[in-house]
Image (spheres, rainbow, N blue to C red):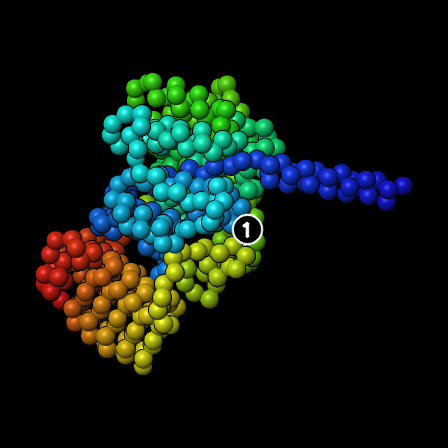
């Protein structure tokens, strides 16, 4: 009798799972990727490119993470909305993200501001979607996924979609518990025991802790799922009003009283191939230089908390034609070296080196992030340095050791991180010569 009941329960569970899979496959999801941010806190890296186009990890751009998450999740209808300093991003998307062939449902489309509704730039995330309602009408999705393009993370978005369907939500917001002391810069969600949102605070001075987890607050990731029939009227109503046109600041909080808005906890998301030593639900808003640098450091070591060597959930980028890196009489420890780079008689410790980098004899690097095509001269010493693409560092330079001296020539972050800008920015070679 017990065995019969167990068998019956198993059959019911399998039927339920099959129904959920069928429901997911029959649901049309359109991704609207918000990739137009200035990224002013990442200056000078964003002086020549938008934040989503900033290189990361020696071989990627920040935008590659959200696009890889969508494609790995089986969602391949994606519009990327660009705006500020977009040329570098547009070229990267054209070269790296051509998918779909002749299929009308598989595409990564770049969408600059069309100014269909009015003149001017987008005035917030909601306004960006409103000005592109024609794209939604053309695709006729059941669900619209509005995601940012400037975070480093892995997420199976299909699991969030299934949760959205199971709860019959009008809107689902991706969230993650973070320590209360770090939560002041984020939108903080309050949810009941079933996950339904019952409150929201935008960057509060005193974030409200989670009742079920002392010392943590529930942070919005700025990623949303909307039922199309819910979103369209909201956008039209929002466009007729004065004030900010932003999902996090005004639209989603206004829905709590009369719509079903649920929180989806990234901690519940399961990524195949995740190693035991990795940080579960790794997510970083790389909005500052210090966080960006630390996220690069998180890739290093024998057991990195973010290990990108995962064939079951690949983060992909553009093709780079070049030979393997050359290490010639060099000491390299706890570092990543990109294709075509050449390190000659150098000492490299805990650093991320991009592609096509040349490091001359006698150079010493410690905890540095060098983007592509950087040239480090002989006997140069660099510590806690980010060097933008193509930077030329003269021989015998000493950067990252004397804060006041560095600040006189370069941008220095709150933690003392020194950033060497792109060569196209003013008189960078003169400043480097003075610092040497």
Residue at 81% across, 40% down: 8
Residue 181, percent from left and from top: 39, 41
Instruction: Residue under label 1, please give it.
Output: 271
- Would you say residue 47 is visible in this rendering? yes
**Residue 351 visible to an observer of this rendering:** no
Identify whether 337 is placed above or below 274: below
Considering every residue shown, the one lying at the far front of the view is 102
Residue at image x 32%, y 31%? Answer: 124
Residue 413 image point, x, y percent: 24, 51
Which quarter of the image is occupied by the C terminus? Answer: bottom left
Q: Which image quadrant: the N terminus?
A: top right
Residue 316 location, quadrant: bottom left
Tag 1, which secondary structure?
loop
- Percent x, y of residue 29: 51, 37
Left or right, 223 with reference to 111: right
User: Which residue is at a point 29% across and 74% down the rendered structure image?
Assistant: 343
* Figure check: 19 above or below 333: above
């Amino acid at each position: 009798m017990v065995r019969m009941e167990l068998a019956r329960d198993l059959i019911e569970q399998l039927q339920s799972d099959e129904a959920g899979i069928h429901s997911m496959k029959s649901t049309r999801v359109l991704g609207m990727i918000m990739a137009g941010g200035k990224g002013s806190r990442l200056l000078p890296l964003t002086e020549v490119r938008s934040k989503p186009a900033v290189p990361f990890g020696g071989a990627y751009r920040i935008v590659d993470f959200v696009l890889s998450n969508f494609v790995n999740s089986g969602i391949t209808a994606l519009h990327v909305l660009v705006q500020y300093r977009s040329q570098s991003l547009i070229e990267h998307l054209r070269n790296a993200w051509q998918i779909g062939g002749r299929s009308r449902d598989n595409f990564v489309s770049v969408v600059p501001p069309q100014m269909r509704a009015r003149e001017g730039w987008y005035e917030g995330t909601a306004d960006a979607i409103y000005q592109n309602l024609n794209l939604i009408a053309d695709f006729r999705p059941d669900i619209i996924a509005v995601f940012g393009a400037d975070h480093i993370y892995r997420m199976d978005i299909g699991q969030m979609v299934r949760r959205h369907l199971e709860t019959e939500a009008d809107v689902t917001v991706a969230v993650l518990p973070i320590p209360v002391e770090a939560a002041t810069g984020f939108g903080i969600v309050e949810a009941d025991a079933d996950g339904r949102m019952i409150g929201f605070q935008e960057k509060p001075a005193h974030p409200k802790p989670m009742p079920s987890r002392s010392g943590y607050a529930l942070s919005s990731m700025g990623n949303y799922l909307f039922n199309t029939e819910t979103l369209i009227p909201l956008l039209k109503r929002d466009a007729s009003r004065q004030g900010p046109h932003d999902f996090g600041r005004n639209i989603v909080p206004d829905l709590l009283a009369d719509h079903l808005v649920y929180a989806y906890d990234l901690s519940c998301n399961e990524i195949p191939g995740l190693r035991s030593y990795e940080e579960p639900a790794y997510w970083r808003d790389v909005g500052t230089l210090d966080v960006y640098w630390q996220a690069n450091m998180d890739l290093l070591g024998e057991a990195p908390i973010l290990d990108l060597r995962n064939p079951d959930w690949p983060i992909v980028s553009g093709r780079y034609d070049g030979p393997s890196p050359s290490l010639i009489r060099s000491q390299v420890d706890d570092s990543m070296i990109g294709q075509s780079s050449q390190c000659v008689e150098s000492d490299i410790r805990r650093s991320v080196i991009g592609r096509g980098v040349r490091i001359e004899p006698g150079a010493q690097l410690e905890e540095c992030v060098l983007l592509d095509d950087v040239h480090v001269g002989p006997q140069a010493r660099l510590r806690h340095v980010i060097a933008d693409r193509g930077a030329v560092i003269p021989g015998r330079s000493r950067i990252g050791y004397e804060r006041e001296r560095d600040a006189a020539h370069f941008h220095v972050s709150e933690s003392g991180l020194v950033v060497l800008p792109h060569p196209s920015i003013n008189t960078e070679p003169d400043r480097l010569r003075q610092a040497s």
